[in-house]
Amino acid sequence: MSKLRTLILSAVALLGLSTGANAATAFLPTDDFVGISFWLISMGMLAATAFFFMEQANVGIQWRKSVNVAGLVTGIAFIHYMYMRAVWVETNDTPTVYRYIDWLITVPLQLIQFYLILAAVRKVPIGVFWRLLIGSLVMLVGGYLGEAGFIPPFLGFVIWMAGWLYVLYEIFSGEAGRAAAKSGNRALGTTFGALRMIVTIGWAIYPLGYIFGYLTGGVDTNTVNIIYNLADFINKIAFGVIIWSCAVANSRSR
Ligand SMILES: *C/C=C(C)/C=C/C=C(C)/C=C/C1=C(C)CCCC1(C)C
């Protein structure tokens, strides 16, 4: 049985090696720094995913959902990074469609985290969950329709901004923000504040990449991709780590 497995694994490995027909384009050149950033971030996503899922065992039961969702976000991003990396290394093109599919799934999951971490320490109305979900979907659909040319790009940008501002309102001064302020939980207050800063400042990196990449004369694919990759590191991995540390702090004090 184990011999058979070794045989199958070797066959798969050989097949994998032999499909890299054109070494010049199929492998990462030493001076392709954008490609290197794709590799680094994809491995970071893998490590973060394994870490969050393993840490399930070390947090209180009411925090497992949040730490789980953090792992789902980096896991989904990891799979997309494998594809984005291949598109970049083989064609030097921006893998827009993979990014948007990734955002379509991970952005709503991340906003739902605000609901989940509140729900871990107190009662929260379910309306908070729905408003965060709907706000994030409005944002993403607007952005995609604009970038894909179904509606004028400027209109897409405006819809994005509207959805984003709505979400910011909810987490700063809306029901979610007020619930966090009233929670009386120190670790939650700090965490909620840090996550809010990520959604405000960390997320602003994407439109900056968009402006530097697309709106400053010609399309600079290097800049767009390196900025988006860096942003994903902060907004997905660091975001998850902050949630995890809050979960650990709260589990210990119980
Ligand atoms: C994990 C991925 C995340 C958190 C992605 C966030 C993406 C954005 C905040 C994108 C924003 C954009 C605008 C505000 C204007 C139009 C261009 C976009 C789509 C880059």
Image (cartoon, helix red, strand yellow):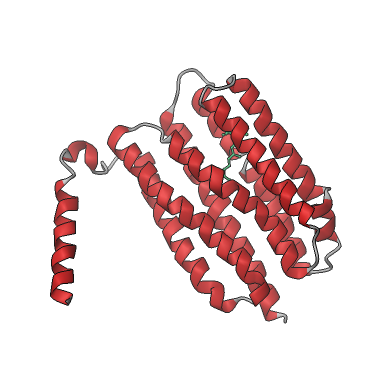
Asked if residue 132 is positioned above or below residue 148 in the image, the reply reads below
Q: Quadrant of the C terminus?
A: bottom right
> Quick check: 5 left or right of 47?
left
Q: In which quadrant is the N terminus drawn?
A: bottom left
Give the quarter of the image for residue 67. bottom right
Q: Is residue 3 visible?
A: yes
Describe residue 244's horizontal placement relative to residue 19 as left or right. right
Where residue 95 appears, as percent x and y from the top left, is 41, 36
Residue 244 seen by the camera: no
Determine the residue positioned at 79% across, 43% down. 169
In the rendered view, would you say 74 is above or below 155?
below
Question: Which residue: 42% across, 59% down?
Answer: 46
Which sits in the foreground, 127 or 161?
127
Above or below, comparing residue 27 to residue 185 in the picture: above
- Spot occupied by residue 220 in the image (x, y as percentages of width and height): 44, 26
| Residue at image point 60% right, 56% down | 239
Q: Is residue 5 above or below residue 154?
A: below
Q: Position of residue 6 (x, y in %)?
A: 16, 69
Residue 248 is drawn in which quadrant?
bottom right
Quarter of the image where ligand 1 sits: top right
Percent position (x, y) of residue 175?
83, 52
